[in-house]
Amino acid sequence: MTGNLSCKPAQIATLLVLSLTTAVFAQESKSLAQQVGVYHWGGKHASGYSSGIRDLTSLNARIVRLTISPQLHRDYNQGPACLPNFTLSGALDNPDLLSALAHPQLEVIMITTYDGAGFGDCFTHPYLNPEWYTPGNTERIVSEYSEFVHRLHVLLQGTGKRLILSNWEGDNALYCGQAYSYLHSDVFREQCLAAYPLAYGGNRGPQDSVKGMVLWLKARYLGMTSGRERAKLSGLTGVQVESAIEFCSLSMLRSHGLQSVLYDVLPSVAFDYISYSAYESLTAADPASALRADLNRIQMLTGTKRIILGEVGFSRSRLGDRQIEAIHKVTNAAIEWGVPYIILWNLYDQDVENDYGLFDLEGRISTLGIEYSRMLSLESK
């Protein structure tokens, strides 16, 4: 699990810089705050959860995406340690995290979750090894998600919040963190396959991990369902907890004869939403048209229109002045199609080459932050 890699050719996951005209704002602002949120995952200026939430909500945001995993301290610049004996439910004892989740301005919180049962050492991926799924280990996954979901209901009851629990870019998870590099770089692919048994708990290659991912997502969903049922029996209301499965390869892998989440995992598992990390669409010559067509294709393949854009973006330094038109077209295309939520990457810049943040490396608001805030401010008027 890492936030630094994606299915797109660019080195790091990108984001949207929303330098649009006032006329565009007026066109898009009808329900913008209820649809467009921001990923808060790492970045040089990140310092825990709640400080980032303060920065984000100061821009009038109501939607955020966070991560919770055994490496949460590392992800949010709180230390290098992989948390021992981690559980998702136990993470809610962290007052910084709980403060972020409970922020009254936030209405929708998407959470990238990795359980302690299957990712406890922050390095190997036994949760993707089908042979790991003994009855006992399967029950550990189910129980961890049941406890987590039930406790979310306990802590956030009556708030009206919607929480959506997701994985991160499943295709990358299958291909050593970089599906694009696996496909296009002989050197990377050879290194990946050589290290695969060690990194993936004995798996011989991605084909084994596809089977493991199906078992993992089934156990997650069973645990979430159990947690929701327990909350209902306890009379806990006023909060929704739902599931999403994220992928990032639409046709890139399949067209080269490789397995992918969309074609080889999703048909076998249950979900409430699909999350598409949409860089494959955004690298097309006409990103907006490609996105519309790709959303139609995803709907046809999965039978659902509940498709979240879990990551979207264009680098402000790479596109320059062309970024404005690109953002306009892509944002409009997604909203007009009916995407329920769009998540922009990222709250904070990662480094000098990856200048995608609403806030830069020094914590100063960027063009993205200014324009994002202005869009949502117009909506409230």
Image (cartoon, rainbow, N blue to C red):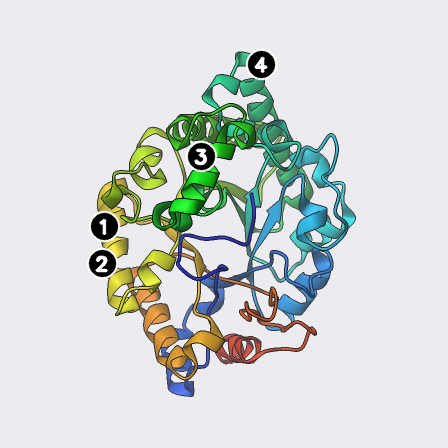
Please give left or right for residue 309 compared with residue 139 in the image.
left
Mark 1 sits on what residue? Answer: 297
Viewer-proximal residue among 36 and 117: 117
Image height check: is 101 above or below 113?
Answer: below
Viewer-proximal residue among 180 and 29: 180
Tell me which residue sits at (53%, 76%) in the image.
368
Residue 358 numbered tag: none
- Closer mark to the observer between disc 2 and disc 3: 3
Residue type at mark 2 is Ala
> Which sits earlier in the primary sequence, circle 1 or circle 4?
4
Residue 136 numbered tag: 4
Tell me which residue sits at (39%, 49%) in the image.
185
> Which sits earlier in the primary sequence, circle 3 or circle 4?
4
The image quadrant that residue 117 belongs to is top right
- SS state under label 4: helix
Residue 193 numbered tag: 3
Decide: marks 2, 1 in contact (CB < 8 A)?
A: yes
Tell me which residue sits at (53%, 69%) in the image.
356
- Closer mark to the observer between disc 3 and disc 4: 3
The residue carrying pointer 1 sits among few (fewer than 14), some (14 to 19) or many (20 or more) residues within 10 Å by Cα, namely few
Image height check: is 74 above or below 331?
Answer: above
Mark 2 sits on what residue? Answer: 293
Decide: marks 2, 3 in contact (CB < 8 A)?
A: no
- Residue 137 seen anywhere in this rendered image of the structure: yes
